[in-house]
Amino acid sequence: MNTKVKMVDERNLDKDIIEEAGKVIKDGGLVVFPTETVYGLGANALQAKGRPQDNPLIVHISDIEDIKELVVYVPEIAKKLMKKFWPGPMTIILPKSQIIPDITSASLPSIGIRMPSNIIARELIRTSKVPIAAPSANISGRPSPTDVERCIEDLNGKVDFILGGDMCEVGVESTIIDCTVTPVCVLRPGGITLEALKEIDGSIYIDPAVMKKPDKNLKPKAPGMKYRHYAPKAPLKIVNGDLKKTIEKINEMVQNYIGENKVVGIIATDETKDLYKNGLVISLGSRNNMISISKNLFETLRSFDDKNVDIIITEAFDEKGIGTAVMNRLNKSAGFDIIRVWCIKCESLNAEFLGGF
């Protein structure tokens, strides 16, 4: 397949390029496109073909009015969430209408709907004149792409069109909220935090199963719930606990792996990167700016693939704010391979880093 690759400036949209990509979608083709979360692999949500999978897709719309023909009804809580957080990194699960094919919804009676804030994404949906079903634009199981170069690396020659824009702002996929249940429930943490959602409805909670290793018999209601996702080529291990003890443990592990002639990658932060004596160290950013951590997470995992490391070890992060989404992705990347370290003087495993090493 001859893949057409075109770049678009978000500050000065080339409507002709976007209309060309929109026609590909409408005619049944595949188009990679940027969103504020990660790059998506888009197709006409209403004309999907093939055998239904067990991993539902998210349907993307350009205007809030577009939701009416896609779902049976919109409950009041969903309307409040849409008013507050759309356009943006939030997906709402609602009872689907009959026009949504089973392959899009994985034969479920519900469907996830999202209105992205990225201007290229919304213009693509508008010009295609159809809702767009889009998983992340990566080889299945790999870290989601947040830069167009990764999409080209994975999908050049496999899709019809790659529409490039800026690096994604959020860096992790959208928050998914199930509005078919009461109280409504978060099925995937993402760019809209639980704390922000609770300002709309204090009863909203994260499904406890989301942060645990999934049951093999689980029938997922949202993308990313069942399988090992976001995984780099090398095994990933998480060291979770008091930060000083975490650094000590990682340094110990690195020495052991080097003794086995293995190349070790370390995921650190600006506060800790100089405290590792050996290994290939990449900082995600500052712990005081968690959005930088989420933005750089997937690209960092893929960077270690480029360096052909044998093992990756990462620090853990507090599960609050967008840190919940970061840990959800790290846990799945690692297949829940977590090493816990204790500090006798600490009251919790996730003690804040206060410096003073």
Image: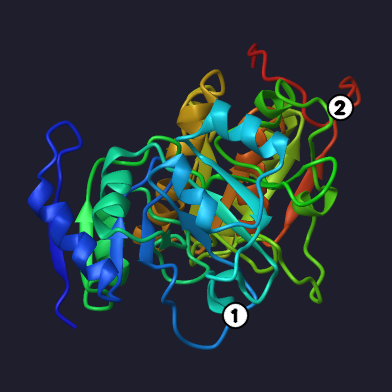
Q: In this view, does 228 lie to the left or right of 68?
A: right
Is 265 placed above or below 22 here? above
- Residue at 64% across, 30% down: 80
Give percent across and percent down for residue 63.
Answer: 40, 42
Is 284 placed above or below 201 here? below
Which is more toward the observer, 112 or 222? Answer: 112
Which is more toward the observer, 336 or 130? Answer: 130
User: Tag 1: residue type?
Assistant: Gln
Give percent across and percent down for residue 229.
Answer: 58, 63
Q: Name the image quarter holding the N terminus.
A: bottom left
Q: In this view, does 11 lie to the left or right of 334?
A: left
Q: Name the image quarter holding the C terminus.
A: top right
Q: Could you say whether the residue bearing mark 2 is in a helix, strand or loop?
A: loop
Q: Name the residue under label 2.
A: 348
Residue 98, image quadrant: bottom right
Q: Mark 1 points at which residue?
A: 53
Which is more toward the observer, 281 or 214? Answer: 214
- Residue at 10% across, 44% down: 14
Residue 316, image quadrant: top right
Is 351 placed above or below 116 here? above
